[in-house]
Amino acid sequence: MSRVTLSRYLIEQTRSHNTPADLRFLIEVVARACKEISHAVSKGALGGVLGSMGTENVQGEVQKKLDVMSNEILLEANEWGGHLAGMASEEMDDAYQIPGKYPKGAYLLVFDPLDGSSNIDVNVSVGTIFSVLRCPDQYLSQNDSLNEQAFLQPGTKQVAAGYAIYGPQTMLMLTLGDGVKGFTLDRELGSFVLTHDNIRVPENTAEFAINMSNQRHWEAPVQRYVSELLAGKEGPLGKNYNMRWIASMVADVHRILTRGGLFMYPWDAREPEKPGKLRLMYEANPMSFIIEQAGGASTDGRQRILDIQPSSLHQRVPVFLGSKEEVERVTGYHQE
Ligand code: P6P
């Protein structure tokens, strides 16, 4: 059987689901940028790209050289194409305005250019997370600056979401709202090839992912639930659980997408004014869209993450996502 590349998949989606040409072009451009990021990441010390910039991003996090480089790769790849009204990134305080010399389009691209970058210097998988929204008509203008309000849409408004994971293989996981597809980068051809046609998250699991060093800071219900997981067969859940924590959301979510599991980054008392560590617009929303499209569930502990009405570009949320049964057990939240 001839191999289905990302380009062929997108063309066939256009025929079967009327995927707009500009959206198809957007995904192709983002995928190409991810190939360039993968190449830079894989060079490591040989590319002079490890280590920090000595600067901090809007989150107050130290910026790695590859954070800034990956951000620039995505901006430069997308700004000229005429498919975007604007961009927003974990690495930039404000929305990115499309330069006046280029035409604007109808989509908004939001991304974490290099998630898990604290792992780069120790050669652990990192990734790029992206989310695509339509720009509301009232904000579309070829001449005026894009108002940041245009981005503040609930996750249910996403038209596409995906991530690239730079691990032993470079893969692109993508949803256009019609299930989740996985593409593996064939480095010899330079093409993403469809290798996982219809990904489903197993409904139940015996594996959870959380940073246990924060346990004393969690709310009581989360502490109780995690202690039940640790109690294993002898405990109330009646089965033994395994634990993984890579501290790279892309890698932890990819494992869950592949073999099931529960990912948790709860609110904790270290920074009580912040509702969590992970960012809604370019981490929680795209990952929640993907997980739901694969039959999983995703909540902030009280409501469906995709229903949250954002109040700011870099808003944070608690995240509980993965195998539906486990998400429901820990949060009492029911995913339709
Ligand atoms: P901690 C990476 O910095 C990140 O944003 C996610 O990719 C990851 O899941 C989380 O933070 C790890 O956080 O507190 O365990 O280092």
Image (tube, grey):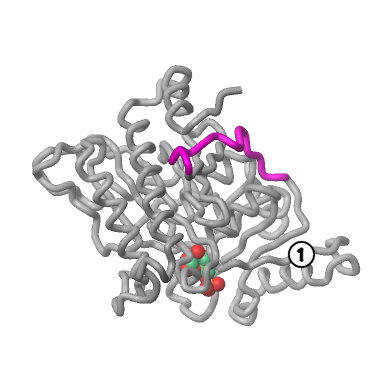
Q: Which residues are magenta?
A: 188-202
Along the viewing direction, whichever of 29 and 207 lies nearer the viewer: 29
Horizontal relation, residue 107 to residue 128: left or right = left
Q: Is residue 157 visible?
A: yes
Q: Position of residue 220 (x, y in %)?
A: 66, 74
Query: Which residue is outermost to the top?
Result: 15
Residue under circle 1? Answer: 242
On the question of residue 313 being in view, the answer is no
Residue in view at x 42 percent, y 23 percent: 11
Q: Nearer the viewer, residue 269 or 85?
A: 85
> Is 159 drawn above or below residue 67 in the view shown?
above
Magenta segment's dominant SS is: loop
Q: What's the amino acid at mark 1?
A: Asn
| Distance from mark 1 CB to nearest ligand 1 atom below 8 Å | no
Apparent side of residue 117 relative to residue 83 in the rendered image (left or right): right
Q: Is residue 201 magenta?
A: yes
The vertical placement of 124 against 37, above or below, is: below
In the visual, does 217 lie left or right of 50?
Answer: right
Q: Could you tell me which quadrant the C terminus lies in?
A: top right
Q: Label 1's element? A: strand
The total of numbered circles placed on residues is 1
Look at the image and tell me in which quarter the N terminus lies.
top right
The furthest residue to the right = 234
Give the residue drawn at x 49%, y 40%.
174
Which residue is pictured at 42% across the width and 62% down the height? 43
